[in-house]
Amino acid sequence: SDWSSDVCSSDLIAYQILICRHMIQTDLLYRDITMEASWEILINSIKELHTNNPILQNFCPFPNDLISQNVEHFHIEACDLIKREENLNTNQYKDLRDKITEKAGYAHWRQTYKGTAVESRFLSQFGCYCLIGVGGPYTSNNMRAWVVYMPPNLYYPWHYHPAEELYFCIAGEAIFKADGQEDRLLGEGGIAQHSSNQSHAMQTNNKPVLAYVVWRNEFDVLPKLTHDDAK
């Protein structure tokens, strides 16, 4: 009868909807697993760099309490710039550089200085995404870690924060400035350390820079600008 035919048709549609929902859920689960695995590949490379470098390891041992968390992608211009960048030159850290760049399109790019006096170009072109901490794929009670990318001819104004900090240059080069110290041009393998509340700044000239940045102690307080040189 027409009635039984309608029931069968209704059951078929409901079954098809159920199958579609299952397929979507399976696909989303697969994407989540794949994404988590790809972040794990990057963090393992970061761990290898960190634990094999005595200065990094003495500054802050690589944490053994990592907990994975979801990353919500946030896009800024720096994301596009690093993917197009051809001058992040490095001999020793090519593989790590490439893994960092590959995750650019999935990372949560920070705008730490939004709402401050920094110029709009810096806000959009200064690249920083978290590896361990808020917005990153992992969290820890003992350390914060970021990737920092700056294109050529970009000035990072003087700033300070309670957390102690270490920059490890992976590729390219930049001039590192710190209160009470001479300016230093650092490239691949170069290290800059900043003590608690020590003012510091950075400048790239004709080359970009890519760095691994670690914070220890009081790392939940955001940086503040030191001078009126941010415009």
Image (spheres, rainbow, N blue to C red):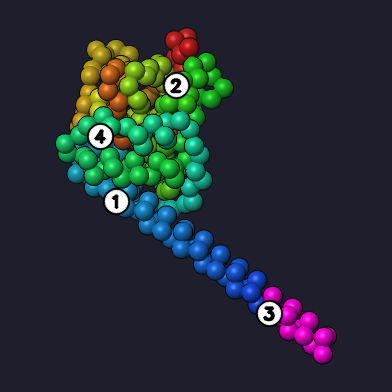
| Pointer 4 or 3: first along the chain | 3
Does the magenta stretch mainly form a helix, a strand or a loop?
helix
| Pointer 3 or 1: first along the chain | 3
Residue on which disc 2 sits:
122
Please give left or right for residue 11 compared with residue 222 in the image: right
Residue on which disc 3 sits:
12
- In the rendered structure, which amino acid carries the disc numbered 3? Leu
* Inter-mark Cα distance, 4 to 2: 21 Å
> How many other residues sit within 10 Å of disc 4, few (<14), some (14-19) or many (≥20)?
many
- In the rendered structure, which amino acid carries the disc numbered 2? Phe
- Magenta residues? 1-13
Image disc number at residue 170? 4
Residue on which disc 1 sits:
44
Residue 12 falls within the magenta-colored stretch: yes
* Inter-mark Cα distance, 4 to 3: 57 Å
Q: Nearer the viewer, residue 76 or 48?
A: 76
Q: Residue at x 37, y 19 (%)?
A: 154
> How many other residues sit within 10 Å of disc 3, few (<14), some (14-19) or many (≥20)?
few
Q: Residue at x 37, y 51 (%)?
A: 39
